[in-house]
Image (cartoon, rainbow, N blue to C red):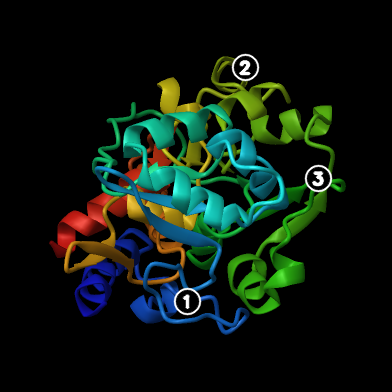
Amino acid sequence: MTALLDAVAAAGKRLVAAAEGKITFDARQALARDGDLALQEPGLWSPNRHCRLVACRDGWLAVSLAREDDRDLVPAWTGASFDTDPWSAVIAAAADRSAGQMAVAAQALHLPVAIVGEAAPVTPRELPVGAARDGLVVDLSALWAGPYCAGLLAEAGHDVVKIESPGRPDPTSHHMPALDTRLNGAKQHVTMELDDPDLIATIGRARVLITAARPHALARLGLDEASLFARNPGLLWVAITAHGWRGAAAMRVGFGDDCAAAGGLVRWLDGTPNFIGDALADPLTGLTAATLALEAMADGRSGLLDVPLAGTAAHFAGAIA
């Protein structure tokens, strides 16, 4: 963990420089949820006990089953009976199958499952110059990575508005109030249906848009690249996803723990991977996305910043290797 904290501290120096010294950064706090959750020591299980590293015939998987809907899909994934404990079913099925077979079958069901070490470090593409250097930041994200990115932009002095659907609000304020205060306390808060024409109008005059949903889900709401950039060519869209914005990766589901393992951000002990922290891909991606956004704004750049959790985790895994 010390090596990771050193890498995060180095990334924090770049963030502070991009924010022109307006941000106070502490590496240890950046990776913490401020005591909202009763966490346990990491090992085969993540500290929140929602994700487990599972041995396959030829490798390892990271499997997240935090949601009831995902646990309900385990019989379809593994072939186990409906009365079998979900984790027992996954462990038994994986022992007889390859990691690739298990991962492909899980991804077809949109389960948050990844092969340990599968992701490559992310390399953001160069964005065109010609946009304004400041303006409204619209935060449509939820949970940790996206809100952390937007919260850092607010701390850096930018005007940030967090827009939430009344039917599906960000659950962080309910489950983790201390973290919610840190991530979202400095933002304006607006409740609005995400298909409301006023949202499109707001994005049309924004400088930055932050999302943390898959592109096809956003497109159903009219939030697609062609439409939004036609309306607002100077927009900087920070797109945070599990595995990437384009291609087959765009359909994949993932969370902070399984994406950290996908990036290889684990500790190997006698041939067995172990988690080294709590949902690490989330804060690392929020930090990275905020830094890239601040640098892009300073340079007057616009376009889509593709910042995947797994690829970001891979970058930090490489930094501490």
What residue is pinned by disc 1? 32
Tell me the residue at 72%/36% (across/down): 202
Q: Residue at x 84, y 43 (%)?
A: 192
Residue 140 drawn above or below residue 218: below
Three-letter code for the amino acid on which mark 3 is drawn: Ser
Residue tagged 3: 165
Q: Amino acid at mark 1?
A: Ala
User: 280 or 26: nearer the eye?
Assistant: 280
Q: Counting residues from the N terminus, which is met first, the one under dot 3 or under dot 1?
A: 1
Disc 2 designates what residue? 227
Pointer 2: residues within 10 angstroms few (<14), some, or many (20+)?
some
Element assignment for label 2: helix
Q: Is residue 177 left or right of residue 165?
A: left
Q: Secondary structure at mark 1?
A: loop
Front disc: 3 or 2 = 3
Residue 257: x %, y % from top left:
45, 58
Compute the Cα span from label 3 to label 2.
Answer: 21 Å
Is residue 107 visible to us here? yes
For discs 2 and 1, the disc positioned in front in the rendered view: 1
